[in-house]
Image (cartoon, rainbow, N blue to C red):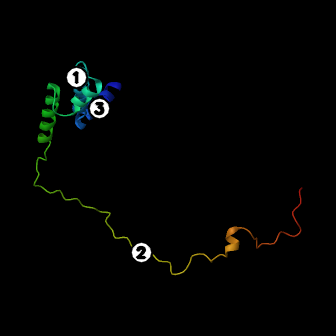
Amino acid sequence: MRTRQVITALVLALTLGLHWAALQSVAWVSMIVRYSQDATLSEAIAQTFDGRHPCALCRIVDAGQKSDENSEGDPLPSRTVLKIDLLCEASRAFLFTHLPFPPFELRAQSGLERFERPPSPPPRRV
């Protein structure tokens, strides 16, 4: 059961292209470590992300991402897919011609005044 879950997660990650993101992260970390040996950390980070100093792994990731983009094209780009929407019904406006309940006075709605009389004689404890 656990093996199936791991395989499913790996296939999903590969489908989403997360392997390129992981490789790019490894490349960036290794570049920061390598550049920080000769300069300060802030200079190493700037040199890593400026785009002018790519490493070999960065070039591999870039080439791989471009090849994935080119190969993921629609096999039939000129074919139009028609979708039938069975629930496309125009909504109708509904207006009440009369209120389904009698109008209440504001006093009755606020609960400040009661209109019923108490039972006569008052209920007693048994």
Mark 2 highlights which residue? 93
- Check disc 1: other Cα within 10 Å, few if <14, some if 14-19, many if 20+: some
Give the distance between the C-alpha atoms of the residues marked 2 and 3, in whole angstroms: 48 Å
Q: What secondary structure is marked by label 3?
A: helix
- Check disc 2: other Cα within 10 Å, few if <14, some if 14-19, many if 20+: few
Q: Nearer the viewer, residue 43 or 11?
A: 43
Q: Nearer the viewer, residue 51 or 24?
A: 51
Report the amino acid beneath label 1: Tyr
Report the number of discs.
3
Mark 1 highlights which residue? 35
Q: Position of residue 106 (x, y in %)?
A: 67, 74
Q: Nearer the viewer, residue 6 or 71?
A: 71
Q: What secondary structure is marked by label 2?
A: loop
Comes first in the chain, label 2 or label 1: 1
Mark 3 highlights which residue? 8
Q: Position of residue 97 (x, y in %)?
A: 51, 81
* In this picture, residue 58 sits left or right of residue 101: left
* In this picture, residue 122 sits left or right of residue 83: right
Report the amino acid beneath label 3: Thr
